[in-house]
Amino acid sequence: MGHAKEGVVFRPLNIAVLTVSDTRTPETDTSGDTLESLLTATGHCCIERKIVKDDIYQLRAAVSNWIACDTTQIILVTGGTGFTTRDSTPEALTPLFDKHVEGYGELFRTLSYEEIGTSTIQSRAVAGIANRKVIFCMPGSPKACKTAWTRIIEEQLDARHRPCNFVEMVLPHAQTACGERS
């Protein structure tokens, strides 16, 4: 398990939240609400939230804008990771990745197995890096969002977490815990 490095300060990141849904509205977007609540409680900034239909091109357009934006550092995407005919988040976003974070999906499914058993195999949670932005895609339920955030993403977005985290990559001049692995 990782731990916090003394002397390294927390660095708030600018995070965009995208909900992929054909039915949710700003009033009914409980997964987006969950993510925004969790990330702001940790000290990060939710700089924008959007809801887009489960359409490959609308997904790519929304995420591509954030990838190109200088102020966005992290992108959280909830929904569209299952196997229905409308679920297209992995197909839409993985072509945008410069690098894939394979371990994220593997770890998410391992942790999710503790909560929902073998149904976790129907989650195609994926993550990747594009233009120094980290993109985490998770299922569309508030419980899945909470699992992804509290058990994986939160530590990886904390500069104090070691032996490593993603903060150094998105804030290249930030003092982080990744400098040494002792």
Image (tube, rainbow, N blue to C red):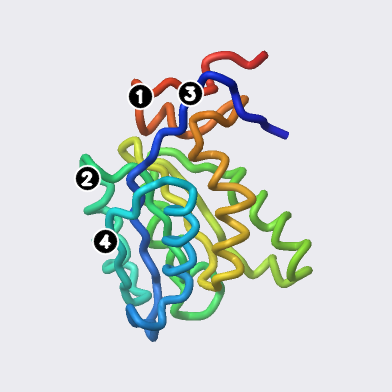
Of labels 3 and 4, the one closer to you: 3
Identified by mark 1, the residue type is Pro
Identified by mark 2, the residue type is Ala
Tell me where residue 51 sits by quadrant.
bottom left
124 sits left or right of 60 in the view = right
Of labels 3 and 2, the one closer to you: 3
Q: Residues within 10 Å of mark 1 (few under 14, many from 20)?
A: few
Residue 61 coordinates in the image, percent (x, y): 24, 61
Identified by mark 3, the residue type is Thr
Rounded to the nearest angstrom, the CA distance separating label 3 from label 2 is 24 Å
Residue 8 coordinates in the image, percent (x, y): 50, 22
At x 43%, y 46%, the residue is 43
Which disc is residue 68 wearing? Answer: 2
Badges 3 and 4: C-beta atoms under 8 Å apart? no
Badge 3 is on which residue? 176
**First in sequence: mark 1 vs mark 2:** 2
The number of numbered badges drawn on the structure is 4
Badges 3 and 2: C-beta atoms under 8 Å apart? no
Q: Secondary structure at mark 1?
A: loop
Residue 107 coordinates in the image, percent (x, y): 67, 49
Badges 3 and 1: C-beta atoms under 8 Å apart? no
Tell me where residue 55 sits by quadrant.
bottom left
152 sits left or right of 70 in the view = right
Identified by mark 4, the residue type is Ala
Which disc is residue 18 wearing? Answer: none
80 sits left or right of 113 in the view = left
Badge 4 is on which residue? 62
**First in sequence: mark 3 vs mark 2:** 2
Badge 1 is on which residue? 172
Is residue 93 shown above or below 133? below
Rounded to the nearest angstrom, the CA distance separating label 3 from label 1 is 9 Å
